[in-house]
Image (tube, helix red, strand yellow):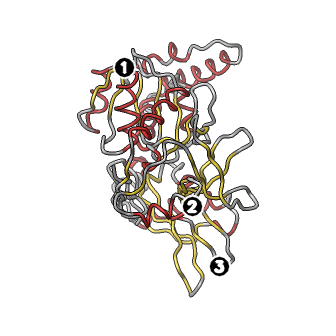
Amino acid sequence: LFTSGTTSNPKAVMLSHKNICKNLMGMCSMVYIGEGDVFLSVLPLHHTYECTCGYLCPLYRGCTVAVCEGLRYIVPNLQEAKPSIVLVVPLMMEAFHRGIMKKVKGDPKLAKKFNFGLKLTRGLRTVGIDLRRKIFDSVHENFGGNIRLLIAGGAAIAPELMKEMQDMGFGCIQGYGLTECAPILALNRTRHFNNRSAGLPLPGVDMKIIDPDENGIGEIAGRGDNVMLGYFKNEGATREVIDEEGWFHTGDFGYIDDKGFVIITGRKANIIVTKNGKNIFPEEIEFLLTQSPLIAEAVVSGKEVKEGDSIIHAEIFPDRDTVDEDPELLGLDLTDEKVLEKVQAVVKEVNSGLIHYKMVRSVSLRDTEFPKTTAKKIIRH
């Protein structure tokens, strides 16, 4: 299997039967998967996330796998297969949530009923009564009516979005892994989870932070029987990521909280270092920017303005539907000056909550989506 190639050229990863089997046993000891479960396989099988978790895991547990006919057929395939579990990437979860909320907001009466349902179920859950599936039955029917678990991976996902899906009765958890780890290193449980976290280390997996700074943030490393044999015909690259003690250096930065949850702050290759030596994780700023419905996608980078110094630049792909919902912007090109003014207002609001050296100082717009891998990750190199 090959790495996704989001930050560098793809590398061939050698995974043994032991790597994969240990990963399967570890993940299934944390999340219950039963013989009656039906998986809808949407993501590409040549990526280890879908291959291990969405194909080999159901075989291991004796489940049914329905293969999606393509992204445009997700909704009819959900209706047809009536799956109980779907593996998703953040873009898919966001699309599910956006579709639900668009329908709700389009009907004032439905919106009122929906919001009352949220308040009612939240209140009832405080006294141990859970009626989410019953009250939001019509929402679940749009997804086939049987989904009990949406498992997100591949990139960070907004914790607020996860909570809103959970409030409607969808079980939502996220995990963290890499192709080199077969792939799972950490995973949230269905009853013991942290929506801001990538999860707890799998059984048999050790995790630590290398060279943490004053905030406890450093490079995440993992060690266990799930770590690859090495890169195919590339011993030099293998030695760069697996040290003498067997620790795999992930290239991701983050920290481990007091409850053992792994919190990812960004990718090592993407870090922007200021003239004063401050580290800026672009993913943090991108996440804040894309919380606005006006911004569909954003890539933050350092833009050199003079020798040895740089400013934070954001390249933004505006959301077509949101632009057209604004009477002042209806029909305008996504790169129009008026659209830019609206986007800059969003950026200004985001900047108000950032420390000065993290503030976005430069903005540009694009009228097409960013190029992505088949796993729907933005290609950054």
User: Image point 69% across, 77% down: which residue?
Assistant: 276
Front-lying residue, 66 or 314: 66
Quadrant (top left, top right, bottom left, bottom right) of the C terminus: bottom left
The residue pinned by badge 1 equals 62
**Residue bearing mark 3:** 275
> Which residue does the image show at 65% across and 79% down from the upper left?
275
Marks 2 & 3, CB-CB < 8 Å contact: no
> Which residue is rendered at x = 49% and y = 63% of the image?
239
**x%, y% of residue 134?**
50, 13
* Contact between labelled residues 2 and 1, with CB atoms less than 8 Å apart: no
Badge 3 amino acid: Lys
Toward the front, the furthest residue is 244
Question: Which of the marked residues, 3 or 1, is nearer the chain's N terminus?
Answer: 1
Q: Which of 12 and 198 lies nearest the eye of the viewer?
A: 12
Residue type highlighted by circle 1: Gly
Element at label 3: loop
Q: With 303 as the anchor, is 4 left or right in this view?
A: left
- Badge 2 crowding class, 10 Å Cα cut-off, few under 14, some 14 to 19, many 20 or more, is many
Q: Position of residue 244 (x, y in %)?
A: 57, 59
Answer with the quarter of the image where residue 64 lies.
Answer: top left
Considering depth in this image, is 144 or 19 the residue closer to the camera? 19
> Of the residues shown, which amino acid type is indicated by label 2?
Val
Estimate the x, y position of residue 48 in percent, counting from the top left: 38, 43
Q: What residue is disc 2 on? A: 347
Q: Quadrant of residue 95?
A: top left
**Residue beneath the point at 49% across and 27% down:** 28
Mark 1–mark 2 Cα distance, whole angstroms, equals: 49 Å
